[in-house]
Image (cartoon, rainbow, N blue to C red):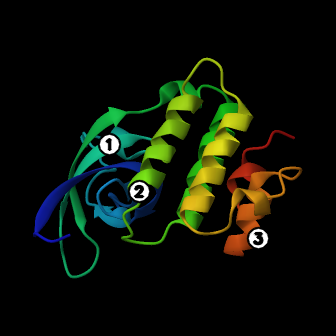
Amino acid sequence: MSSRSNSVTGIILKRSDVGEADRVVTIFTREEGKITAIAKGCRKLSSSRASSLEPGTFSKVYLIKTKSLPILTQAQLINDFSKAKQNLASMRKVFEVLEMLDQLLIEEDAQEQVFALTVAIFEHLSSENVRSAVIRDYLSSIIETLGFGERSQIDFSKPLRDFVEEITQHKLKAYAFLTQP
């Protein structure tokens, strides 16, 4: 972030509550890559930012640079991809993609092509005819673009999350958490 304040557009990857009313938000932005910011007071009932900062939403956010985390002052919802979150099976795909992206991306490394692929994934998840092969193709392109390997190295007989867990050496939790017994 070159100036003291700026606006970026991005997809919310994750959030965690801090203190009484604040939230730390991780955003994959078009302009700056993956960033983490603090949204002060966004958990208050009167906050207009809360819905724009939910995981899997596409939002425009306004940030003020500080010595530690940037402060998120405003958020404007662009697309909530609500059709992608209508049932448990589609929610599982959404959160699995979000967690994979969070693990694969590094902080403040702008990746416009990866961002475009990410938006395409969420637009596809919001479509009427969701196909796992399309999502897998987009994620494979992201993995290749980020330099984690070529498509020829990916064993498509196993779930893609297994490949991501292997290269990041981190167990993905979204799939297990959102799987119906």
SS category of the residue bearing label 3: helix
**Position of the C terminus by quadrant:** top right
Q: CA distance from mark 1 to mark 3?
A: 31 Å
Q: Check whether the beta carbons of the residues at disc 2 and disc 3 lie within 8 A of each other.
A: no
Question: Against 71, is 53 above or below?
Answer: above
First in sequence: mark 2 vs mark 1:
2
- C-alpha distance separating marks 2 and 1: 10 Å
Instruction: List the single residue furthest toward the left.
Output: 4
Closest to the observer, 86 or 94:
94
Left or right: 86 as drawn, with respect to 171? left
Q: Which residue is mark 1?
A: 59
Instruction: Tell me the amino acid under the disc marked 1.
Output: Ser
Q: Pointer 3: what residue? A: 166
Residue pictured at 18% horizontal, 76% vertical: 66
In the image, residue 49 lies at what x, y percent?
A: 28, 44
Instruction: Write the residue at 38% across / 41% down.
Output: 58
Residue of label 2: 28
* Vertical position of residue 83 compared to residue 39: above or below: above
